[in-house]
Amino acid sequence: MEPVTLTTGRLLLRPFGPADAPAVHSACQDPAIPRWTPVPSPYGREDAERYVGTTAPEGWRDDTLYTFAVVTRDGGTLVGAMSLVRLAQLRTPERQAELGYWTAREQRGKGYTSEAARAVVRWAFRDLGVERLEWHAEAGNDASWAVARAAGFHREGTLRAKLVRGGIRRDIWIGSLLPSDLPPDTAPDGSASLPAPEPTPYLPYPR
């Protein structure tokens, strides 16, 4: 699909471009990003160039990974990245996706990532027809959970030994967000790109 741009009160969520490589490279020198996310470590300039020039645009083109550069509206400073992954499932009855993100160290603690997350999840539900969003993070990543919780996610539990990182199996936390979890009247403007199909009926437990 063609990349889209979303806006919030303070932020612009747009596709990455080659000019973003220096800022991405600089942000990913922070040890916390490779510690909690799957970015390469050490993170070189060529990794940043590949991310903004190949990985991000190919994901949009293939409908597998929709990645937004999150920047401030009042100066274009890179806040971080936010992606919807596993969107190939939208072609099946499952209609599920996973939200992932990282934030530059200097931009943390300002509520930017939660603000961006709320815009992306509403776009996913309204324009892409997603029926279940998931959030995964290595157990102990309290900062990531704070963002997910602020966006409306419900933490469902711990998946033991699910993640292998650095040759070690680690537990992960998992959370979910459904369209019914959000109020219907505060969605930001966003360009519709895929028609939202009729929702799959949901039968929660207990019956």
Image: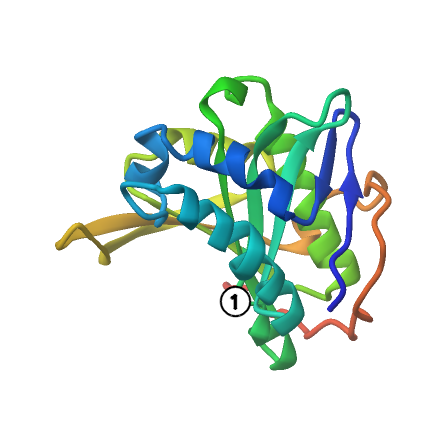
Residue at horizontal 60 percent and vertical 81 percent from the top: 92
> Residue 56, percent across and down?
57, 57
Q: Quadrant of the N terminus?
A: bottom right
- Determine whether 188 is above or below 71 in the image: below
Q: Quadrant of residue 19?
A: top right
- Residue 125: give x, y in percent of width and height: 72, 57
34 or 140, nearer to the observer? 34
Residue 188 visible in this rendered orientation of the protein: yes
**Residue 143 against residue 21 in the figure, above or below:** above
* Residue position marked by numbered label 1 in the rendering: 86
Q: Nearer the viewer, residue 192 or 42?
A: 42
**Given the image, on which type of amino acid does mark 1 rest?**
Arg
The residue located at (32%, 48%) in the rendering is 40
Indicate the position of residue 166 as horizontal and vertical percent values. 17, 50
Residue at position x 71%, y 27% from top? 76
Q: Quadrant of residue 59?
A: bottom right
Viewed as shown, does residue 100 lie left or right of 112?
left
Q: Nearer the viewer, residue 159 or 44?
A: 44
Left or right of 125 in this view: 159: left
SS for callout 1:
loop
Camera-side residue: 165 or 163? Answer: 165
Task: State how many labels appear.
Answer: 1
Residue 50: horizontal and vertical position, in percent? 48, 55
Quarter holding the C terminus is: bottom right
| Disc 1 packing (10 Å; few <14; some 14–19; many ≥20) | some
